[in-house]
Amino acid sequence: MSGSDCLLHIEDGISVSGRTLAGVDEAGRGCLAGPVVAGAVILDENRPIHGLRDSKALSEKRRNELFEQIREKALAYSVGIVGAGEIDRINILQAALLAMEKAVLALGKKPDCLLIDGNSKTSLPIRQKAIIKGDSKCASIAAASIVAKVTRDRIMTEIESEYPGYGFSRHKGYPTKEHLGALRNLGPCPIHRKSFKGVL
């Protein structure tokens, strides 16, 4: 696969030469609490989704709008989730890769190649390329980042009712001043990553 093949913006109608490409990305790697969530998306070049960007560069409203378009127009999309206990057991890098593998395996359509955000590849027996800042270069990775981010944010918002006092619906488990203050006052709850600095 050539370098140009890995930087295709499918929403611009560029051919992928018959290959089925799945973009893969994760959300929540830097959080102190909650799961790491990966998204995998196979876009349909005949049903473009305009405005795909790295999820972090989008407003919450726009992410949710694009998430609904991805659900409607993508050939396939899926998520993979790895919880805090497993993150503590195998470390966050391995947990993120495991979440990515789960997402890819859950796709309803088997991809010929994976385009993965970052510099690490999965152990899946599928052709794959890791792309630094891929969520700002590849449409399918950008779509995967949106799926992962929206899914994880919704999980953390729901979790707040189970573990009140931490403000999970606002900071989603990231090490904000509010979250660190809650940790000092309340201590960690069951979804905190005990192996992360600042939790214990």
Image (cartoon, grey):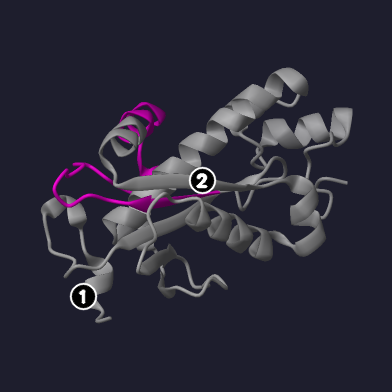
Q: Is residue 5 left or right of residue 190?
A: left
Asked whether 68 falls inside the magenta stretch, the response is no
Is residue 196 in view from this perspective?
A: no
Instruction: Give the magenta part as a residue range.
Output: 38-66
Residue 54 image point, x, y percent? 36, 49
Residue 56 on the magenta span: yes
Question: Which image quadrant is residue 152 in?
Answer: top right
Residues 152 and 196: in front is 152
> Left or right of 121: which side holds 50?
left
Q: Can I make out residue 139 in this image? A: yes
Q: Position of residue 190 (x, y in %)?
A: 84, 36
- Kind of residue sitting beneath label 2: Val
Q: Earlier in the sequence, mark 1 or mark 2?
A: 1
Q: Residue at x 57, y 73 (%)?
A: 123
User: Residue 22's spot in the image, x, y percent?
Assistant: 36, 59
| Residue 13 drawn above or below residue 69 | below
Q: Which residue is mark 2?
A: 79
Residue type of the residue flagged with mark 1? Ser
Residue 4 shows which numbered tag?
Answer: 1
- 144 relative to 133, above or below: above
Q: Quadrant of residue 189?
A: top right
Where residue 102 sits in the image (x, y, percent)?
Answer: 57, 55
Indicate whether 96 appears above or below 143.
below
Q: Residue at x 51, y 57 (%)?
A: 105
Q: Is residue 148 left or right of residue 54?
A: right
Label 1: which secondary element = helix
Front in this rendered view, residue 102 or 163 = 102
Quadrant into which the N terminus falls: bottom left
Q: Secondary structure at mark 2?
A: strand
Rendered residue at 17%/50% (across/down)? 11
